[in-house]
Image (spheres, rainbow, N blue to C red):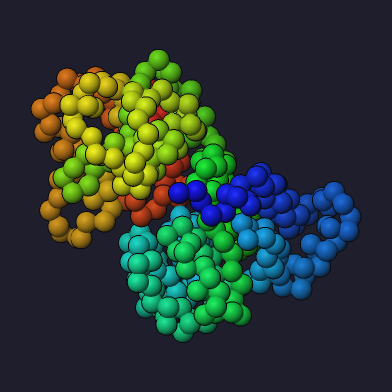
């Protein structure tokens, strides 16, 4: 199904990046005035009056600066916020990484998960700023209605946009909204460097397949459209061992180990979903175990040569710019990059 924003917003993604970047540059202390004196003066006045102007998928937003009561629902931006020392009053901790400082903070209201969010907790948090996106995209209108005095920033990404561009646009937007432009710029620079390393290390003659493991099963991740790994094929210009379209873009498609063996990929890129979501102490068959114990896969080039790169164990709960940076660096290291 086509993403609801595509019809009206996909063509302006590049312009949005430019607007957010321009705003970030204009807000740095000591920076030169932006082109267009009136716009630059207006931006300066906004900051002095306690707001900053950002542009998201919904349009132009006046964000309180600094915001005093922040709610975040998007797991892909929360680790950066935590690292920047941004306090939050509420978050859906059930679907956030467990190592966040917020997870042990009794003052942070747990909104639960996107399936059955605690909207009463959201109202009780009385936010002045809500950063909303990804699994909570469908709750945007409800949140707007429940906390009408809060400023909403849509941190969603365009699933049809280039992965690296969307990750950069998203974190740049969040950095600008929270006054952490430098921190966002560092994350973007790290991502770009990791992509360059992985691209240089990869031999385009070698074929690659993406896999996802969950519940003891191995699923196929389609190039470009498949969950998490799919967009990596375009970012790194990888040569697919199998070009089968995705039926399930979220959880991977059923595939027999015989089909994997027949495709005989030189490299496997693997996400272990259970590693991120299995209850503490629960027993499950991890990706490495499933692959190593499959007799049908033992003659696959990638398995024989140990050419298997696993996404970070908590990737399913992070999926952020830091996680992709770490993954690209792992790809570069595995492929002998400098």
User: Is residue 62 shown to the viewer in this render?
Assistant: yes
User: Is residue 190 shown to the viewer in this render?
Assistant: no
Question: Residue 64 vs residue 125: left or right?
Answer: right
Residue depicted at x 42% and y 78%: 119
Residue depicted at x 47% and y 64%: 138
**Vertical side of 141 occupied by 316: above or below:** above
Q: Which image quadrant is residue 264 in?
A: top left
Q: Position of residue 68 (x, y in %)?
A: 58, 76
Residue depicted at x 28% and y 40%: 253
Question: Residue 36 vs residue 190: left or right?
Answer: right
Residue depicted at x 89% and y 55%: 37
Q: Residue furthest right?
A: 37
Q: Position of residue 281 (x, y in %)?
A: 15, 59
Q: Nearer the viewer, residue 31 or 93?
A: 93
Q: Which image quadrant is residue 286 in?
A: top left
Q: Position of residue 314 (x, y in %)?
A: 32, 51
Which quarter of the figure is the C terminus placed in? top left
Q: Nearer the viewer, residue 331 or 240?
A: 240
Q: Residue furthest bottom?
A: 124
Q: Position of residue 148 (x, y in %)?
A: 59, 79
**Vertical side of 189 occupied by 31: above or below:** below
Counting the numbered discs, the total is 0
């Amino acid at each position: 199904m086509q993403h609801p924003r595509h019809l009206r917003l996909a063509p302006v993604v590049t312009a949005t990046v430019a607007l957010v970047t321009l705003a970030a540059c204009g807000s740095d202390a000591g920076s030169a005035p932006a082109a267009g004196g009136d716009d630059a003066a207006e931006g300066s006045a906004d900051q002095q009056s306690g707001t900053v102007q950002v542009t998201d998928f919904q349009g132009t937003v006046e964000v309180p600066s600094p915001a005093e009561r922040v709610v975040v629902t998007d797991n892909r931006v929360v680790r950066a916020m935590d690292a920047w020392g941004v306090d939050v009053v509420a978050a859906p901790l059930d679907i956030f990484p467990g190592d966040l400082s917020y997870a042990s903070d009794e003052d942070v209201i747990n909104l639960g998960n996107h399936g059955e969010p605690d909207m009463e907790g959201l109202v009780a948090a009385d936010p002045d700023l809500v950063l909303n996106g990804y699994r909570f995209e469908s709750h945007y209108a409800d949140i707007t209605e429940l906390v009408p005095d809060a400023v909403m920033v849509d941190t969603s990404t365009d699933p049809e946009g280039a992965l690296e561009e969307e990750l950069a646009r998203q974190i740049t937007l969040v950095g600008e909204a929270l006054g952490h432009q430098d921190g966002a710029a560092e994350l973007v620079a790290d991502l770009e460097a990791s992509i360059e390393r992985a691209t240089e290390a990869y031999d385009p003659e070698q074929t690659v397949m993406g896999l996802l493991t969950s519940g003891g099963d191995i699923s196929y991740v389609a190039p470009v459209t498949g969950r998490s790994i799919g967009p990596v094929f375009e970012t790194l210009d990888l040569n697919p061992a199998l070009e089968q379209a995705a039926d399930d873009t979220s959880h991977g498609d059923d595939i027999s180990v015989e089909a994997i063996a027949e495709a005989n990929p030189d490299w496997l890129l693997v996400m272990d979903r259970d590693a991120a979501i299995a209850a503490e102490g629960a027993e499950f068959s991890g990706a490495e175990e499933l692959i190593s114990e499959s007799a049908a896969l033992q003659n696959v080039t990638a398995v024989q040569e140990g050419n298997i790169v696993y996404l970070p164990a908590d990737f399913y709960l992070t999926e952020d710019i830091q996680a992709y940076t770490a993954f690209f660096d792992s790809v570069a290291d595995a492929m002998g990059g400098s």
